[in-house]
Amino acid sequence: MSALHFKMPSSSLWLAKGFLCILFLGLFLTGCSKEPIYQEEGYVFGTMVEVTIYGEPEERARLASAQVMHEFQRLHNMLHAWKPSELSDLNKAIAEGQDRVVSSELAAILQDAGSLSRESHGLFNPAIGGLVGLWGFHSDSFKPSEPDPDVIAAWVKANPQISDLTYTSVEGGVKVHSSNKAVQIDLGGYAKGYALDRALELLKKAGIRNALVNIGGNIIALGKHGQKLWRVGVQHPRDAGALAVVDLQDGEAIGTSGDYQRYFMLGGKRYCHLIDPRSGYPVQGVEAVTVLTRGARAGVLSDADSKPLFVAGVKGWREAASWMNLEDAMLVDGNGGIHITIGLKKRLEFSNKNVRLQVE
């Protein structure tokens, strides 16, 4: 019999924002299965999270999953951009022109996000939380309304950058100072990936050899699913079901940014939560970007690296991928056209065998 345990949340507080951008395929957790599969589910980071462990005794899998879920909640509590958290306390201090002492962990996260922002030539910009909030996406539910263009222009002119932050080691942590009061940090494009990397660390420490961790469609693989690789599907941005499937190697991660995850419709136009820091407006002309990453920071990269490609759009996504040293990527444009690197083309199996691909 399968060792199954499903931990469901007492309330789906952010369920309206919890659209999965990648479907989890290939595991059928039935009572008659002979495979020792253990899965725990919950809601955190505003989305559905899953930890699936293969080939371990139920007690060991249960304890390891609980550690991972506990870590996810800790990170959620630390990195929330607008509800009370260590990060929101920092944002409040910056807006008031004050310094703030933060934990060494948060300082390291901010510095790493800053490095990724520099690599992306500013297209990945975690400092534009004020713009994200202005468009209504700092809320458990968002209403279809367009902000005042003058206010948007003021935010763009203020040009908040994570490089505006400076760090000084002090007793009890790191003092953070911002030379720009407009900086408001939103790690929505980083936190899930960081959590994936932490999950892998904890699972390995617990002696788990084979697992799959899914945070709202950002997925990382550990080991295998029995004799097979872990197989996941990339969500079609407009239709139900998978656009394609891919087998993940040990330590690989995959992530998708889509305009279908958090958005509203206004005047027949779609406004998504992915904001172009150059214009202050939600990105248009892109439905989804998928990236496949590997290495010591595969989780972080699966989250952060898709953002500059999305913002760069059809004309600039390939150059943005080169900035991020990203070989495996795919962009679905506003007309449903698929642009893909040759590396990812070799890995994906498309549901529509006749799909036209533009290899770039």
Image (cartoon, rainbow, N blue to C red):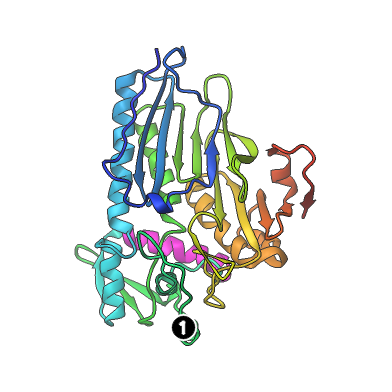
Q: Quadrant of residue 213?
A: top left
The residue that disc 1 covers is: 148
| Magenta stretch, main secondary structure class | helix
Query: Residue at point 44% right, 26% down?
Result: 209
Frontmost residue, 335 versus 62: 335
Q: Is residue 57 located in the magenta-colored stretch of the structure?
A: no
- Is residue 317 visible in the rendered image? The answer is yes
Type of the residue with mark 1? Asp
- Is residue 175 visible in the rendered image? The answer is no
The image position of residue 345, as x and y in percent, is 73, 43
Query: Residue at point 26% right, 41% down?
Result: 10
In the rendered image, the quadrant that contains the N terminus is top left
Q: Residues within 10 Å of mark 1 (few under 14, many from 20)?
A: few
Give the magenta range: 105-121
| Residue situated furthest left in the rendering | 171
Query: Residue at point 49% right, 40% down?
Result: 220
Frontmost residue, 94 versus 26: 26
The image position of residue 26, as x and y in percent, is 56, 27
Q: Up-down: is 285 above or below 278?
A: above
Query: Residue at point 27% right, 54% down?
Result: 77
In the rendered image, the quadrant that contains the C terminus is bottom right
Q: Quadrant of residue 206?
A: top left
